[in-house]
Amino acid sequence: MNNRINWAQKSPEAYKAMLGLETALSKSGLDHSLLELIRLRASQLNGCAYCVNMHANDARKAGETEARLQTLSVWEETEFFTEKEKVVLAWVESLTLLPVHRAPQHQYEALLKHYSEAEVVNITLAVATINAWNRFGVGFAMMPS
């Protein structure tokens, strides 16, 4: 049972700020399914049970297949993801595990082969945003219902 504070209730301004990031992402033009893959992969890496559950469900609603969802944690070992998606997933992992991977130049250049500079900014915003949500989810022991 979760006995930690309800952060959104205790700091509505913090919650409102996070929703502002989501509003920006909804206007970014990025594909909804890609956004859910970004959110789900980062949440897996961060161990946020609440977010993994929510974004797996949201990805299904966005049209993701069970095969892709079941193998997202081992995306490099499958043929289920396009090259364009793989460069994003590599970026997600590097930015989520920043102290380990540091955002390598070759990954940045790979992104620019498939996405515009504005899209790269918005992909990075998506990674930063889900990592922030994950800190609230893990930090306040949020559980899926």
Image: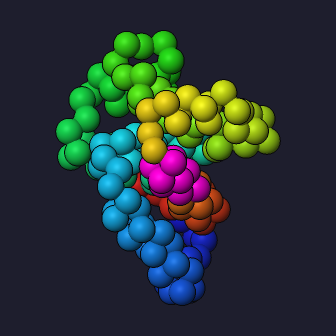
Name the quarter where the C terminus is drawn: bottom left
Q: Is residue 124 magenta?
A: yes
Query: Does residue 39 show up?
Result: no
Q: Does 35 sit left or right of 112 as displayed?
A: left
Image: 1 above or below 32: below
Which residue, as the protein is rendered here, is positioned at the far right?
99
- Using the image, determine if residue 8 lies above or below residue 39: below
Q: Which residues are magenta?
A: 117-128
Q: How is the image coloured?
A: rainbow
What residue is rendered at 34% in x and 63% in y?
26
Q: Residue at x 35, y 31 (%)?
A: 69
Residue 75, percent from left and from top = 46, 22
Residue 88 is situated, as x and y percent measured from the top left of the image, at: 49, 35
* 23 within the magenta span: no
Q: Is residue 54 among the parts visible in the rendering? A: yes
Count the labels in the image: 0
Q: x%, y% of residue 83? A: 42, 22
Q: Quadrant of residue 81?
A: top left
Residue 109 left/right relative to 12:
right
Q: In terms of depth relative to the viewer, which is nearer, 4 or 120?
A: 120
80 w.r.t. 85: above or below: above
- The foreground one among 73 and 139 is 73
* Residue 123 drawn above or below residue 9: above
Magenta stretch: dominant secondary structure: helix
Q: Residue at x 52, y 78 (%)?
A: 17
Task: Identify the residue at image location x=56%, y=80%.
Answer: 14
Residue 50: % across, % down: 45, 54
Q: Nearer the viewer, residue 38 or 44?
A: 38
